[in-house]
Structure formats: C-alpha cells, structure tokens
Image (cartoon, coloured by chain):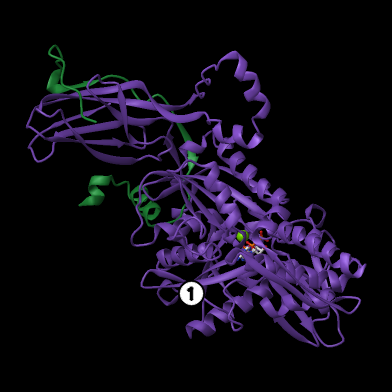
C-alpha cells in the first residue's frame, strides 16, 4: 500500500511537523542472551548510539 | 547478577566451554564448532542423558544405565531431583521419586540415602547428588572433545528462584565447573533457532512450549530484532510426559488384566517394567503409526506383548493432550495477546516429538503461525536438543568475556529498559486510513527500524504521517442461513444428522485489525519520481525520544525531525 499524496494545503517548517510524544511505555527486562543483546549491552555500557555503532 | 561471577575461574582465553541443560528427566550437553551447535552423545550413545544416578556394589552409574536400575534396584537409584535443588524439604513434591530413592528431610534440606560405597550407606544432599551428576556430564563432554571442559552455560526454568540459581551454581562449581551464565530454558530454545544461518531475525511474537517429562512450561516472548523479552509464563505439573506414560500404563495394565487376571501395577517391580516399556512405546508412536509393547515376565511370570496404533494412543492420552492446549492458550491470554498475534510456536522438550500435540497446536493457531515441531515443519530442530544447543551458543558468545564483564552486561541496569506500549508506524492508502507498522509494541528501546514504502503510481509530493497503532480482534459471525420454506425447514431439522450440521456450520471469522492511534509527526517528501519509494527510519531513544528520518530512496536530502 502506497503513501498518500500530500494535501494541497499542507505546510510546515522544513517539511516536518511534530505532533505528540509517545503515549506510553513500560519497564521490562530483556533476556541477556544472544548476539543482538550483547551488541545492546555494549552500546549501553559505552553510551553509544546505533549510528556510532554502525561506523 | 552476583551468581555469574565465579571465584577465580580459568582465564577467558583458556576456557573450554559447553552448554548444559539439566532437566528433572534428562540432561544434555552441547558444544559449538564454527558457530554451529552440536549435542554430544555420552559413552552409551545417548544425547538425552537420563538425569539419574545409581549406586551398586560401590560403583556409580549415571544416565541410561542408572535409569535401567529403576526396575531392579529402585532404592539405590536417585531420579527426578533437579527441581529439589535450592528448595526446602517441606516445599518439594516427591511424587516422581515414588519408585526410586526417596527424598529425606535432613534438617530442612533434601537428601537421599544410598550405599555409595560397599557396605557403607551415606546420606547425600541434593546438592551433592547434583554435583556428582554434573561431574559425569562434564567428563562425558571432556572425553568427547578430547580436552578438559572448564566452563558452561546452563539453562534453567523461568520459574527458578534466586535461591535455586545459587544452589545450581554451587553444585556446578563443586564439580569443578565454572558457570558463565544461567539462561532461561525457552530463550535458549529461541536462540538455537535464531542462530541458524538462514534464520530471519524479524520482529515476532514467539510462544515456546517446553513439554518435558514432569513439567510443562509455556513462555510468550516478544522477539525484537534478535532481543528477547518475556511477556508471560505458565507452568504446569499435571500435564507432561509422565502423564502420557501413566495413561498408557493404565491402558496396558487393563489389557494385561483381561488376559491374566492380575494387575501389574500391584507390585513395584512389575510397575517399573510397565513404566519403562510404556515410555518406549510412547516414543515409538511419535515416529510410527504402530508400536509394540512387550515386556518379558511382566507380572506373575507372564510375558506380555501387544500392539497399539497411534489413533488408539491418541484416545488414551486425550485428557493430557487437551491439557497442553489449555496451557498454551492460557499463556497467550496471560500475555494479553490473541492467538492471531502469535507468529511462531517453538516446541521443545522431549514430549514435543508427539505428532498429536503439534497437530493440535496447528489447529489452535492461524495458518500464518509457524509451528516448529517435527510433525508440522520440515525445518524444525530436534525439540530435545534445542536448549542445550542454545546454551552452547551462548557459551561460545561470551567465553572470551571476563567474569566481571558478564556480570556487568547482565546487570539490571543494562537489562531493565523501557519497552514501547504501542506499535509505531505510518499511515498508507489512498484515503490515509491504513496503518503500516514499522516498530511493533513491546520493542525494547533504544531501537531503530527502517522500511521502504511505495508511493502513488505517478509519484509527486507525498505525506509521511507517523502514528501509534494498536490492534483489535474483529469477529465476524457467520451469515445466518437463508430461511428455507417453512414446510421443509422442519423436515430438514429432523433428519439433519450431527455430522451434516458439523460440516455445514461455518466458523466465525476472526481477524486482527490495526487501529490508528496517537499522531506523532508528519513529514512531506516532495517530487518523488514515478515508481519511487520512500524510506522511513524510526529511531526511539532510551528516553523515548523519537527521531524520524524520511527520504526518497536513491535521492539526496530528505526530512529529519525529532519528537
Ligand atoms: N520421541 C518422543 N516422543 C514422545 N515423547 C518423548 C520422546 N522423546 C522423549 N519423550 C518424552 O519427553 C520427556 C522428557 O522430556 P525432556 O527430555 O525435555 O526432559 P526434562 O526437561 O528433563 O523434563 P522435566 O524437567 O519436565 O522432567 C519424557 O517424558 C520422555 O518420555
Ligand atoms: Mg526441560
């Protein structure tokens, strides 16, 4: 399914309009298992972002 | 997790690691070679090694050999003890030890009395029993690998308490084994699947049905980009492998009584023979549609041999099979989910070999749900091997880590994180009313997901509306049958047999429907070329800040904004 066309009257600064923050989240525990978790732990411990990790 | 740190273990570089699953009924050991896990056979050729120790004339037997002693020497044979580790005597259920050495109360702790040396009888704590058994596993693995195993990852039930974890680690340490980490049984099973080179590490809801010998554990897991979050667990001790054995034992006992007028369940030795052969027959019925139950001198000196087919077995075990269905359905419900939300069911534990159980689950879940079991999937991994394999894989992933590093990485500061409650996606469709999920609910943050979305055929300026989304289950009742003419309607009712009406009755239709929720942001991508696609990246930070990036695929620039 395709993206809708932009309504003619739509406008925003730099073409981006921020509306609301995320409505809710919960604290849960991820299982400390597997390669993807280890990558997560590495990022968390070295306070690195995904893009820093990608480099 | 303090228990991960072990006192001055080997240097990371010189570790030899294995994965262990240590069950009440069976244990397995596995190792990895070229990042592929393999389960090791013991000296007797068993990959599922019965968790049993037996003492005879000063000799110690374990595994299959020890299990065989349950017939002739039950009192010196210790079985079904794993769940007693780290428990007080008053809180254990000794049911399964009835026909083996009985657990005793030694000032609150569980112990067994056996003659482990000639003449002399000793009282062994369950901790000591576990250490001795573990030593045998380690030595079998060391023999197989040709080098001394130093370290292991062991899988444990999700219901294991801190006290039980500590007791298990102590028992293993006493056997000279460094424990790198204890990991959850169901997570080990998922890891074994996800580690396959062809695995698709997508976002999915996985239900792990671990059907063992004395217990069944069902776990609902949000698997998100290869990270696993447990949403719900259910544990059951009334529907498991031994209950299928019991059903078959009753069946064969009755058959025997018809012929010989004596109940083979009335003396312990006959009962033990009956149990051993019932289990073997049950396993044979997982492979073939017929199996033979034969025991020499079952009772009163009578040999007994009779065949049973799978259909009969499935009738005999019906109550237990129904119990598995309820357990799985209950766990899904407990997670606040519907069967339509479940992408995959991973069946593990020995009992998961049973075709009827897999077929029943096939019937409960929609066709789009993969049921990973030998009976329902040609790519299923042996359910008896999943956990040991997962443990071995985890061991190989962390074997280079210092114990302190493992401890730090598994600390709640790293593992307890926010999970988004609703899906995040964009709105698509001509009328802008179709939700396309990009990051599903229960994804741990920080997280990042990217999708490519088509644009209208002619291209042009398009709107990227980033919204939250939720689902609900839409139930459509079958259309009422068109009323027939009054006269033959009555006739129809009368001769409609149950069978006919069953066949004609349409089931209600259940579908998962996405609903567009809160709006997060909007972005415009202008001048998209004909047939172009837009790539949208959603990045949610640990503090729940959302960054949206959208651009035409292959084009420069694009839009980026933060919420
Ligand atoms: N091929 C098979 N078909 C049917 N049942 C099987 C098969 N293989 C093993 N089983 C059964 O699986 C059960 C053992 O399961 P598993 O090896 O997972 O043990 P476990 O985890 O130690 O069990 P628990 O801790 O629940 O006692 C036994 O009841 C056994 O008879
Ligand atoms: Mg088990």
Q: Along the line of sight, which residue is nearer the eye, B453 or B352?
A: B352
- In the displayed structure, A12 sits above or below B449; it is above
Image position of B423 (left or right of B103): left
Q: Residue at x 45, y 45 (%)?
A: B369
Q: Looking at the rendering, which quadrant does residue B401 occupy?
A: bottom left
Q: What chain is tagged by disc 1?
A: B
Q: Residue at x 8, y 37 (%)?
A: B555
Q: What tint does the image give chain B?
A: purple
Q: Along the line of sight, which residue is nearer the eye, B60 or B162?
A: B60
Element at label 1: loop
Q: Where is the C terminus of chain B found, in terms of image quarters?
A: top left
- In the displayed structure, B119 sits above or below A43; it is below
Counting from the top left corner in percent of width and height, residue A13 is at 14, 19
Q: Which residue is mark 1?
A: B10
Q: What tint does the image give chain A?
A: green
Q: Residue at x 60, y 71 (%)?
A: B48
Q: Residue furthest top?
A: A9
- In the displayed structure, A46 sits above or below B443; it is below
Q: From this viewpoint, is residue B3 visible?
A: yes
Q: Along the line of sight, which residue is nearer the eye, B54 or B246?
A: B246
Counting from the top left corner in percent of width and height, residue A37 is at 40, 52
């Amino acid at each position: 399914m395709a993206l809708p066309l932009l309504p003619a009257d739509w406008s925003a600064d730099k073409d981006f309009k921020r509306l609301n923050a995320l409505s809710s989240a919960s604290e849960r525990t991820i299982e400390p298992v597997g390669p993807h978790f280890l990558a997560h732990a590495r990022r968390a411990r070295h306070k690195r972002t995904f893009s820093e990790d990608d480099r | 997790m303090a228990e991960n740190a072990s006192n001055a273990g080997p240097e990371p570089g010189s570790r030899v690691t294995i994965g262990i699953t240590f069950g009440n009924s069976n244990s397995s050991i596995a190792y990895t070679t070229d990042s592929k896990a393999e389960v090791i056979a013991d000296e007797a050729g068993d990959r599922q090694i019965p968790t049993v120790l037996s003492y005879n004339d000063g000799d110690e037997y374990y595994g299959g050999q020890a299990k065989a002693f349950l017939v002739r020497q039950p009192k010196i044979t210790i079985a079904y003890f794993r769940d007693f580790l780290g428990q007080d005597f008053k809180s254990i259920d000794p049911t399964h030890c009835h026909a083996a050495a009985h657990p005793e109360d030694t000032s609150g702790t569980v112990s067994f009395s056996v003659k482990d040396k000639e003449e002399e009888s000793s009282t062994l704590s369950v901790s000591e029993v576990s250490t001795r058994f573990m030593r045998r596993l380690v030595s079998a693995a060391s023999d197989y690998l040709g080098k001394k195993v130093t370290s292991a990852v062991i899988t444990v039930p999700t219901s294991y308490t801190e006290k039980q974890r500590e007791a298990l680690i102590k028992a293993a340490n006493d056997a000279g084994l460094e424990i790198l980490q204890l990991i959850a049984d169901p997570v080990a099973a998922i890891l074994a699947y996800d580690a396959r080179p062809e695995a698709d590490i997508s976002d999915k809801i996985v239900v792990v049905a671990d059907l063992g010998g004395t217990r069944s554990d069902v776990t609902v897991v949000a698997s998100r980009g290869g990270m696993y979050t447990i949403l719900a667990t259910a544990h059951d001790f009334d529907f498991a492998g031994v209950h299928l054995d019991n059903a078959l034992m009753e069946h064969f006992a009755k058959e025997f009584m018809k012929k010989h007028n004596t109940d083979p369940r009335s003396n312990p030795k006959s009962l033990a023979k009956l149990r051993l052969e019932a289990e073997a027959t049950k396993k044979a019925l997982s492979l073939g549609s017929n199996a033979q139950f034969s025991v020499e001198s079952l009772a009163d000196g009578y040999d007994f041999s009779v065949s049973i087919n799978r259909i009969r077995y499935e009738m005999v075990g019906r109550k237990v099979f129904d119990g598995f269905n309820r357990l799985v359905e209950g766990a899904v419900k407990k997670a606040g989910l519907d069967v339509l939300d479940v992408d995959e069911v991973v069946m593990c534990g020995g009992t998961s070999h049973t075709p009827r159980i897999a077929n029943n689950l096939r019937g409960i879940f929609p066709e789009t749900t993969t049921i990973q079991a030998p009976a329902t999937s040609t790519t299923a991994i042996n359910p008896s091997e999943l956990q040991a394999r997962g443990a071995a894989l985890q061991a190989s992933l962390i074997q280079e880590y210092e114990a302190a590093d493992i401890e730090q990485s598994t600390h709640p500061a790293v593992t307890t994180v926010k999970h988004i409650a609703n899906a995040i996606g964009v709105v698509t469709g001509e009328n802008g009313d179709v939700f396309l999920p990009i990051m599903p609910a229960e994804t741990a943050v920080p997280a990042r997901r990217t999708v490519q979305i088509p644009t209208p055929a002619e291209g042009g300026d398009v709107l990227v509306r980033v919204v939250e989304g939720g689902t609900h289950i839409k139930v459509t009742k079958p259309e009422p049958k068109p009323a027939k003419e009054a006269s033959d309607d009555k006739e129809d009712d009368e001769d409609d047999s149950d069978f006919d009406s069953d066949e004609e009755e349409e089931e209600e239709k259940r579908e998962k429907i996405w609903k567009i929720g809160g709006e997060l942001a909007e972005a415009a991508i202008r001048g998209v070329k004909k047939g172009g696609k837009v790539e949208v990246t959603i990045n949610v930070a640990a503090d729940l800040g959302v960054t949206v990036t959208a651009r035409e695929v292959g084009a420069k620039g694009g839009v980026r904004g933060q919420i």
